[in-house]
Image: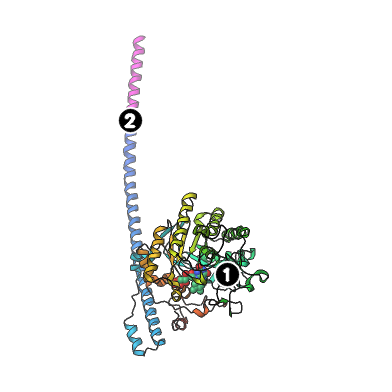
Amino acid sequence: MKRAMQELLDGLEDAKDRITNMNDKIHEDFAIGLNAAIGPLQMKDEALEASIEALKLDVQEKDNTHQAEIEAPKVEIQELKTKLVLCKNSIANGATANDAYTVQAAPRIEVLKPKDFKELAMTGLFSAYKMGKFNLSHRVVLAPMTRCRALNGVPQPALSEYYGQRSTEGGLLITEATPITQEGIGFPHVPGIYTEEQIEAWKKVVDAVHAKGGPIFRQLWHVGRASHKIYQPGGCAPISSTSLSISENWKILMPDGTQDNFSKPRALETSEIPKIVERFRRAAINSIRAGFDGIELHAAHGYLIDQFLKDGINDRIDKYGGSIENRCRFLMEIIRVTVAAIGGDRVAIRISPAINLFEAMDSDPLNLGLTVIEQLNSFQADTGSKLAYLHVTRPRFMPSREQVSENEEAKLMQTLRRAYHGTFMSSGGFTRELGMKAVTDSDADPISYGRIFISNPDLVYGFKINAPLNEYVRETFYSHDPVVGYTDYPFLGQEGSDKDSYMTKVCS
Ligand SMILES: Cc1cc2nc3c(=O)[nH]c(=O)nc-3n(C[C@H](O)[C@H](O)[C@H](O)COP(=O)(O)O)c2cc1C
């Protein structure tokens, strides 16, 4: 019985082994079969991927060829248009048909081709720049410029068109100076930022710029004594750091287009100053509410803040006058409250220590500039708030009243630039070449362009291809027309443009 059981157990063991062997064999066969089946599939897959890659390369190559084919005639057209402009220009300037032909045959300028753009993109004005949180794709900035095209202090659709025309992807625009209160007005038809209606209207301007991908800062303005009773609420005297008037050598533009003397100002009481500081703070908040990317405090060109900074004007005996630190106090208080309200990276400052516009003279412009800069540096270090930029106007902007020589000016600007810890923007008399040089030599980060940006809505493109530029018409700088001399300057090669009418007017 025992043996019979043992035989049965052995038989079972045998059967188990056979089953295990069979299972292994089946698995083995299955694995071989599977591999045999997957192998070709994998190969097909790889072959498929390879042919997709080949196709992609082919499409890319065709696309490149196409692109080149499309660009070539575009460049040719641009070259022809440039030659045409040169030709028309020569005729307008009294050249004979023969001269015109010579110009046409040998243009004075070299128009760049798109292949050169790649190299250009790395250099000077055309190199990208990180300005705090803003990624600028080039260094050509629209300088703030008063253009008097508002209606009852409210921006009109023409402003959206004007700023929209001048915006580029990643290109910074700064608006015209905008009064923070009615008392801050000293020009006719300027758009403010102190009523809800104004904020709503500015939103459309901002939208037009943002639609093109560029940031826009608003310049905040109080003219102080550079005003006339006619612009003041209730016909009161304008306010200032002083009660001294701007002399009759300077004139103010009146609402009817005539000129008059500036009105005698009233010196602010010390206790009134916080109210003005508060107005700057409110205007900064209003700017952000209107969608602006930041604000620039106008502490330049003889307006209210400059009237505190300069010892040729500020004759106060309180804590806002006397020592250079006291004269900087008003500016620093405004910076402090605006930074607290909207953040340092949205606050910029413009100064012009060496410009005596409206008799804003200082006995030591370099020391004044350096003191402002030291205070800005300390403020940034103490608070950890980096300001957006410091914008400095070169004295050259006012050649007829120039106080300093070209050498002195270069030294002054370089000293200020080296002293400031942050983005340094320079303005005044820059051409394409001077801008390229300033950025390459690290004399400035971005450059702001004024007059030639008025007359060349696509200035950035014009600079890129090194095209001849439209001349500006000084007579229409401050006229009230929403089109003429404002939005009607022709774009490069614009069809049917009346470009030559601008080209013939030479304005210094
Ligand atoms: C018509 C006109 C209006 C200006 N308005 C302002 C202004 O509102 N705020 C300001 O800071 N500078 C103003 N400026 C000065 C410009 O911002 C700029 O610094 C000046 O034109 C020098 O640059 P440019 O040589 O490129 O023109 C104005 C200049 C012009 C020609």
Decide: is 195 above or below 475. above
Q: In this view, does 449 lie to the left or right of 114?
A: right
Helix, strand or loop for the magenta stretch, by majority: helix
Instruction: Decide if residue 214 is in sight here.
Output: no
Residue 88 at x, y = what percent?
40, 84
Residue tagged by mark 2? 24
| Chain part drawn in magenta | 1-24
Residue 299 at x, y = what percent?
51, 64
- Residue at the right extreme of this rendering: 234
Q: Which mark is on residue 244?
A: 1
Q: Which amino acid type corresponds to the residue marked 1 in the rendered image?
A: Leu
Residue 473 at x, y = what percent?
48, 79
Q: Does the magenta stretch include residue 9?
A: yes
Q: Is residue 368 left or right of residue 4?
A: right
Q: Which amino acid type corresponds to the residue marked 2 in the rendered image?
A: Asp
Residue 362 at x, y = what percent?
48, 66
Between 412 and 67, the one nearer to me in the picture: 412
Between 126 and 436, the one nearer to me in the picture: 436
Say which of marks 1 and 2 sits in front: 1
Label 2 SS: helix
